[in-house]
Amino acid sequence: MSQTFQTTRRVEFRDTDAAGIVHFSAFLIYMEQVEHEFLRSLGLSVHHQLEDTSMSWPRVSVDCDYRGPAKFEDVLDVSLTIARIGSRSVTYRFHFERDELTFAEGTMTAVCCQVRPGHAPKSMEIPEWFKEKLEPFVDQTATT
């Protein structure tokens, strides 16, 4: 059984649309915030200084399915698991709910890249020390 990272997000007024519900784009921001919080909890980051280069994680794919309206001041329970770890990418799975009612589910894929000033990011193998910290969160039953 894989581990799940759990956290919460409170819906702020700025996250809502004219109808008073969470604007779809806010869920994408929540997903990125939760990814950052998850990595920090493991002593990791989306930006690491390596010996001669920086390592970062540009997003290459994001999707989110909306199941119901979340509103201003709602506190959403968010869970994160890893759907897949490849040699150069990680796909996260997110689940948003309150009182056992699902509001949204999504995935986000990020690619491990070398980042050097004046150069385009270049994909690289995920370092073993990074991958080892993520592996307990890989959902073995996931299909992406």
Image (cartoon, helix red, strand yellow):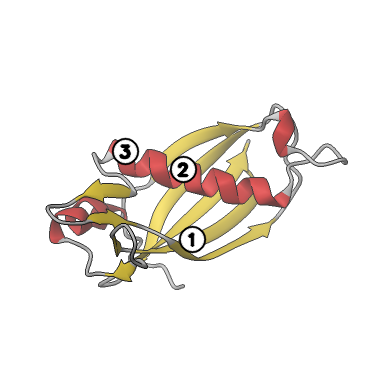
**Relative horizontal placement of residue 50, taking residue 15 as reference (left or right):** left
* Label 3 with label 1: CB-CB less than 8 Å: no
* Label 2 with label 3: CB-CB less than 8 Å: no
The disc at residue 108 is 1
The disc at residue 143 is none
Q: Disc 3 or 1, which lies upstream in sequence?
A: 3
Q: Position of residue 35 (x, y in %)?
A: 42, 47
* Label 1 with label 2: CB-CB less than 8 Å: no
Q: Disc 1 or 2, which lies upstream in sequence?
A: 2
In the image shown, does 55 or 85 lie closer to the viewer? 55
Count of numbered labels shown in the rendering: 3
Residue sitting at x 58%, y 56%? 105
Q: Residue furthest right?
A: 19
Q: Position of residue 139 (x, y in %)?
A: 36, 61
The disc at residue 40 is 3
Residue 87 lies in quadrant: bottom left
Residue 62 visible in image: yes
**Measured Cα–Cα span from mark 3 to mark 1:** 17 Å
Secondary structure at numbered mark 1: strand
Residue 36 lies in quadrant: top left
Residue sitting at x 46%, y 35%? 7
Q: Residue furthest top?
A: 73
Q: Position of residue 15 (x, y in %)?
A: 70, 38
The N terminus appears in which quarter of the rendering? bottom left
**Measured Cα–Cα span from mark 2 to mark 3:** 10 Å
**Measured Cα–Cα span from mark 1 to mark 2:** 11 Å
Q: Position of residue 49 (x, y in %)?
A: 21, 48
Q: Residues within 10 Å of mark 3 (few under 14, many from 20)?
A: few
In the image shown, does 108 or 74 lie closer to the viewer? 108
| Residue 144 drawn above or below residue 73 | below
Residue 85 visible in image: no
The disc at residue 34 is 2
